[in-house]
Image (cartoon, rainbow, N blue to C red):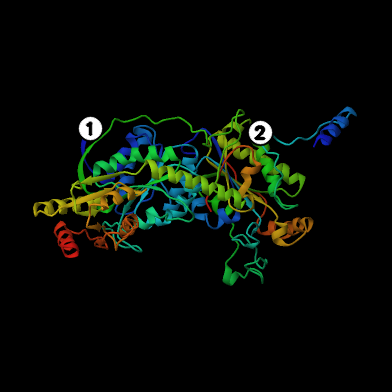
Amino acid sequence: MKDLEAYKKELLAQGAKKIFSKTKNLTDTAFSYCGGCGHGVAHRLIMEVVEELGITQDTIGVAPVGCSVIAYEFMNIDMIQAAH
Amino acid sequence: MKRVLPEKYMFSYQGDGDLAAIGTGETIHTCNRGENIAIFFINNGIYGMTGGQMAPTTLPGMKSSTSPYGRNLDTMGHPLSLTEMIAQLHGTYYVTRQSVHTPANIRKCKQAIKKAFENQKLQKGLSFVEIVSNCNSGWKMPPVEANKWMEEHMFAAYPLGDIKLPKE
Amino acid sequence: MDSNIRLMKGNEAIAEAAIRHGVDAYFGYPITPQSEIIEYLAKEDPFTKRNGMVVLQAESEIAAINMVYGAAGCGKKAMTSSSSPGISLKQEGVSYLAGAELPCVIVNVVRGGPGLGTIQPSQADYFQSVKGGGHGDYHMIVLAPSTVQEQYDFVALGFDLAFKYRTPLLILSDGAIGQMMEKVVLSEEKPRDNTVPDWAIVGKTPNRERNYITSLFLDAEVQENQNKRLQKKYTEIRQNEIRFEEFMTHDAEYLIVAYGISARISQKVVETARNQGIKLGMLRPITLWPFPSKRLVELSQQLQGILCVEMSAGQMVEDVKLAVECKIPVKHYGRMGGIIASPTEVFENFKTLFL
């Protein structure tokens, strides 16, 4: 993890520009979804929009049953897991 | 939840099992009451988590662990286009179908998600965003092939685009 | 007009208590014999006319309990009510509420079963109420009112206990108490309380970690720990919250154990027996879970026999037998299918069984 930070610094020092950063509304937990699955992108888009609209403090999500049953592990907002 | 905390933003993130099968009644009535929330419906045509069983959205002839010989329309019924049904209800304000398999689609989808939250802010009522997705594990295909299959088959049954737009 | 004493139906008392106690939301679905609860609330329209309490007729009993789950997750005082078949439908939701440790009050105005049964009063939902009607290792606190006044009072008590222990609580009424009219002393109307419990989901502020409400713990060890937490809570409830009432037990040689409407009938039986010189007393459990087992053990030292009077084939009688470990004779008498036994009938059976 430290190496990555150092590598980032090195790149920035070499004139690299930061063009993408993960929204703070996603936790650092790695997605448990299969490679190629759409859930990760969908999670990211929703959380980005919530951040861009500045409504993180006022947003509550409902997690479903299925692969994204643990959406609350990834979305860094107040959430409730719904019934089966 | 929205009723007891009306000033907050509520969204639900649902799949084709809870939204289109076991919770169909609740989905329809929530939409019909025009609750001021956003519903994001991820449709991949299968139950991924429980091991690839047939969903209401499974396509005709599509194989799953509970339709191993392909979905037979005579005995298993037709794929359910819940989104089109929802659009007919008076309570819904904005209904759209998107996907996230190419950068262009991702951008469009994000706009739709944004619109859903903005509608909520303006107290417009219910916004419903379906996201047609793949399930390469459930479909037993590599990701690229799954996306291609999705374009060819899923989009034919579930065409992308806005289904109900605000009358303004 | 706004006198604090009113003649009310048991069901109406529950509805008025909800408004006066400052309950935030009621979600229900009509079913006889408890529809007066939602009808009264709809007529009062507290959302626009009184204190802003949300009242919503859901599309089904299942939807109603899940709305309670959502509102309770937001830290609000939410309740629902139904009668037997409807309560069966709600059981999955109840299990989720228990698993996610959410407080709420559920009212069951019991009717005769099984199946669609009858609309007459019954006490045959005892097992479902106290043994956990839904899946998994859980308990609800179960309060059994026997008067319309208690129907009223137990709403406030119910929410106090539910929030104290973060647990769903059931008021186990029956069609007789729900429908009968009695005098009720009303409490002052309280404003709704806007305090937000620290576990509630109301939007994540930057100064705290996100809250999430769930009953899902995929890791078996985490799930076992969650179960241990629940069991610890249940032990605490057993230690602190057992409630019961005694009638002429000081010198009793025989005891009737009865709750709800059966306790009203049994009180009359005790009076009749006493008039004939028979030393009969009564213990009325107010909390059916936790059950007043300890007090029964104490009393059993002086007793020659216990009669359980219930409107069922004999359900609570099992808990009484367990409590006294069958060291003294424990018998059951009850009618089923919605029939209320008369005091004379109970007394005659008591004599046949014990004297």
Q: Above or below — where is C184 with respect to A33?
A: above
Which x, y percent locates residue A84? 53, 54
C98 relative to A28 in the view: left or right:
left
Q: Is residue A39 visible?
A: yes
Q: Above or below — where is C260 with respect to C3?
A: below
Considering the numbered disc 1 on the image, is that residue within a helix, a strand or a loop?
Answer: loop
Q: Can you name the residue that lies furthest to the left here?
A: C276
As measured in the structure, the alpha-carbon distance from the residue carrying label 2 to the one carrying label 1 is: 51 Å
C25 relative to B6 in the view: left or right:
left
Which x, y percent locates residue C69? 47, 45
- Are discs 2 and 1 both within one chain? no
Q: Residue at x 71, y 48 (%)?
A: B100
10 Å crowding of disc 1: few (<14), some (14-19), many (20+): few
Q: Residue C51 or C262: which is nearer the viewer?
A: C262
Q: Residue at x 43, y 50 (%)?
A: C139
Frontmost of labels 2 and 1 is 1
Q: Residue C346 or B148: which is nearer the viewer?
A: C346
Q: Amino acid under label 2?
A: Glu
Q: Can you name the residue that lies furthest to the front here?
A: C301
Q: Amino acid under label 1?
A: Asn
Q: Residue C245 or C54: which is nearer the viewer?
A: C245
Which x, y percent locates residue A46? 65, 40
Choose top left, top right, bottom left or bottom right for residue C32.
Answer: bottom left
Q: Which residue is mark 2?
A: A51
Considering the numbered disc 2 on the image, is that residue within a helix, a strand or a loop?
Answer: helix
Q: Above or below — where is C117 with respect to C301?
A: below
Chain for disc number 2: A
Which x, y percent locates residue C291? 34, 50
C322 relative to B122 in the view: left or right:
left
Chain for disc number 1: C
Q: Residue at x 39, y 31 (%)?
A: C192
Q: Which residue is mark 1?
A: C4
